[in-house]
Amino acid sequence: MDNNTFSNETILAWLNFFSNGTLIDLEHVKILDITRKNKNVVPTVEAHRTTLVFTKAGDYDIFYRLWNAGLGDCEVWFNEGNVPIGKIYHKKVSDMINRGINASAGMLIINKAARNTAKIGLSNELFQKGSIHYVGSEIRSIILNKMTIAPQDNICVISGESIAIEAAMLASEGNVTAVEYSSADRNTLEDNIEHFCLHNINIVDHVDEKTMKDCPVPDVIFMVASASMDQELDYFIRVNPKVRIVIYTLDFTVAAGIKNTLEPFGIINPEIIQVSVSTLESNNMFKQQPAPWIISAKVERFLHIV
């Protein structure tokens, strides 16, 4: 186990160890190997009552990160050493915030308050402040619904910082490539990645063959309509003609002309909706949020794009 890899045999041994040594029901246990760089421990523990986490030595702040995310009441079942033998210890996360991981091993984390549902439409208050003006959480929920993200999806998000954060939580077995043209926005996104303890987001500063060559080919892309949209669509449809596309715009002329914009890429019948959200303020007056157009599309007529 020195190479931090956990085989099927090793995983079964740890499951058997905790099954024999505790009264915890492991029927619906979520297995998470965070020795792989793109695995997110905090969102996984938030969403599952029982998580079997495999860790590597040298993770010195894992329990602090869980505590900082509001998971201090979760219970941790663990042993000493890197093999599934010996005494099983039982403590709360809040009692372990100064304890690191000294050996590659497995541990059970029990979250009795787990939601067991996807977290969609986070309040803007939860995001780190910075250069970004976040879209309203209700509108973000609709965008994420249109993206239809599966746990294994690879996603590209262009100029949609809060979308990238929530997409990374939903695509727990996939990856998110976030394209940020502004250095200030990149810095704010990095703050949010650290704040939410996400490990499956990669940030690049533009879209072309060179910057994207080491990024996973996306199954779905989200983009804010811009002057570079044609070039971005050209690239993504070439690398994956079956890619799902969601476009956000506040510009009526862009929304009105989007069918003509998309037709050369083989996209014939995009779905176009406008979303309007009003909230009741303390003065009993309704305040209307910006009302964007959201375009959902996919290639229907495959073309040879050069």
Image: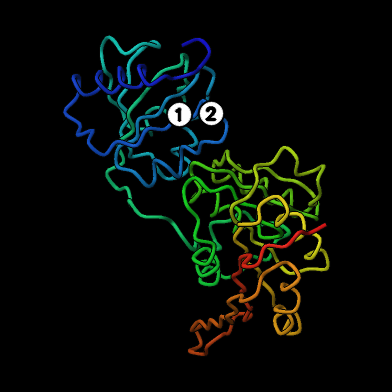
Q: Is residue 96 above or below residue 10?
A: below
- Could you say which quadrant of the image residue 160 lies in? bottom right
Residue 201 horizontal side relative to residue 147, left or right: right
**Residues packed near mark 1 inside 10 Å, few (<14), some (14 to 19) or many (20 plus):** many
Closer-to-camera residue (5/105): 5
Residue 67 placement (x, y as % from top left): 44, 38
User: Quick one: quadrant of the C terminus?
Assistant: bottom right
Residue 73 placement (x, y as % from top left): 33, 40
User: What is the three-letter code of the residue carrying label 2?
Assistant: Arg
Q: Is residue 290 above or below residue 100?
A: below
Q: What is the distance, in whole Å, between disc 1 and disc 2 at their CAs?
A: 6 Å
Closer-to-camera residue (40/237): 237
Residue 287 placement (x, y as % from top left): 56, 85
Q: Residue at coordinates 81% horizontally, 45% vertically from top-left?
A: 209
Q: Residue at coordinates 20% horizontally, 31% vertically from top-left?
A: 24
Residue 288 horizontal side relative to residue 120, left or right: right
Q: Residue at coordinates 46% horizontally, 16% vertically from top-left?
A: 104
Residue 56 placement (x, y as % from top left): 49, 20
**Residues packed near mark 2 inside 10 Å, few (<14), some (14 to 19) or many (20 plus):** some
Residue 156 horizontal side relative to residue 47, left or right: right
Reading the image, the residue beneath label 1 is: 33
Reading the image, the residue beneath label 2 is: 36
Q: Is residue 140 above or below residue 166?
A: below
User: What is the three-letter code of the residue carrying label 1?
Assistant: Asp
SS for dot 2: loop
SS for dot 1: strand
Closer-to-camera residue (58/16): 16
- Could you say which quadrant of the image residue 83 lies in? top left
Asked which colour scheme the image uses, the reply is: rainbow
- CB of mark 1 within 8 Å of CB of mark 2? yes
Residue 80 horizontal side relative to residue 37, left or right: left
